[in-house]
């Protein structure tokens, strides 16, 4: 995904995770770059299907949190769960839990805009906590500051200026009908719609506490 942090942040075995994820990210950086003349990446200040991309990032988190972990597209290692709870004009792609290299394959209906995080975090109130939304926002911002790498490559075309796609949110509810208890921050992109056929998307990022590298092989039909 993505990082998920409560009041007591998750301790990560940085030595193991760093070696594994930096290797994967290095492979992505070594791919041949090309000028960005491929599928459209929507500027972050433009709406998608009439909705701001910041709001889409909130909806992405609500979608991600709507699954039990074993059946979550975020935990999926193959792409078999790619179509779970997808609807409308926007199709979510999943990141991963914590630091992980992931490759997935799936089919996407034609005409969909793809929306997904390069790397991101959500902070939320611990049980019985009265932590303020401002405090949650500060924690989310600290976790997503200063990425050392942001990667987006679609069909061999490498995109840059990705730091502009940072989308900090206001306080929101992760679960429908519950009080606002979370703030998210991170780097999201909206891509497409893609032409019918097969496409390969590489995306990821490196933050001080987490790295992510994801490859999707998509069949658009």
Image: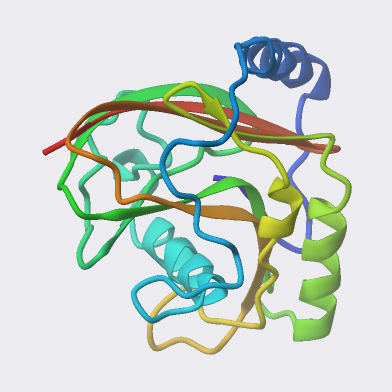
Task: Write down the quadrant of residue 140 in the picture.
Answer: bottom right
Position of the C terminus by quadrant = top left
Q: Is residue 154 above or below residue 144?
A: above
Q: Is residue 182 visible?
A: yes
Residue at the extreme left: 221
Q: Position of residue 206 (x, y in %)?
A: 75, 34
Q: In the image, is 59 to the left or to the right of 148?
A: left
Q: Position of residue 50 (x, y in %)?
A: 38, 81
Residue in the foreground of this view, choosing between 91 and 160: 160
Residue in the foreground of this view, choosing between 217 and 126: 217
Q: Position of residue 9 (x, y in %)?
A: 77, 51
Q: In the image, is 128 to the left or to the right of 114?
A: right
Q: Residue at (41%, 42%) from the top-left corner? A: 39
Count of marks overlaid on the render: 0
Position of the N terminus by quadrant = top right
Q: Residue at (86%, 37%) from the top-left corner? A: 208
Q: Residue at (15%, 47%) from the top-left corner? A: 109
Q: Is residue 3 above or below residue 185?
A: above
Q: Position of residue 28 (x, y in %)?
A: 62, 17
Task: Write down the quadrant of residue 205 in the picture.
Answer: top right
Q: In the image, is 17 to the left or to the right of 33?
A: right
Q: Is residue 122 visible?
A: no
Residue in the foreground of this view, choosing between 19 and 221: 221
Q: How is the image coloured?
A: rainbow
Q: Residue at (67%, 19%) from the top-left corner? A: 25
Q: Is residue 157 above or below residue 60?
A: above
Task: Write down the quadrant of residue 20 in the picture.
Answer: top right
Residue in the foreground of this view, choosing between 199 and 18: 199
């Amino acid at each position: 995904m993505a990082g998920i942090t409560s009041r007591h942040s998750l301790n990560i075995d940085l030595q193991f995770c760093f070696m594994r994820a930096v290797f994967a990210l290095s492979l992505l950086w070594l791919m041949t770059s090309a000028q960005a003349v491929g599928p459209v990446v929507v500027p972050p200040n433009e709406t998608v299907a009439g909705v701001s991309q910041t709001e889409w990032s909130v909806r992405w988190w609500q979608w991600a949190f709507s699954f039990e972990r074993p059946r979550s597209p975020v935990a999926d290692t193959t792409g078999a769960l790619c179509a779970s709870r997808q609807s409308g004009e926007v199709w979510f792609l999943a990141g991963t839990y914590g630091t992980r290299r992931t490759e997935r394959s799936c089919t996407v209906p034609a005409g969909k805009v793809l929306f997904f995080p390069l790397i991101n975090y959500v902070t939320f109130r611990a049980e019985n906590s009265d932590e303020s939304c401002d405090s949650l926002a500060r924690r989310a911002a600290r976790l997503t500051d200063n990425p050392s790498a942001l990667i987006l490559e679609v069909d061999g075309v490498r995109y840059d200026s990705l730091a502009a796609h940072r989308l900090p949110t206001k306080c929101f509810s992760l679960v429908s009908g519950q009080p606002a208890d979370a703030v998210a921050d991170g780097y999201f992109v909206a891509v497409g719609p893609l032409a019918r056929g097969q496409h390969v998307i590489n995306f990821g990022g490196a933050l001080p506490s987490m790295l992510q590298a994801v490859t999707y092989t998509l069949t658009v039909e």
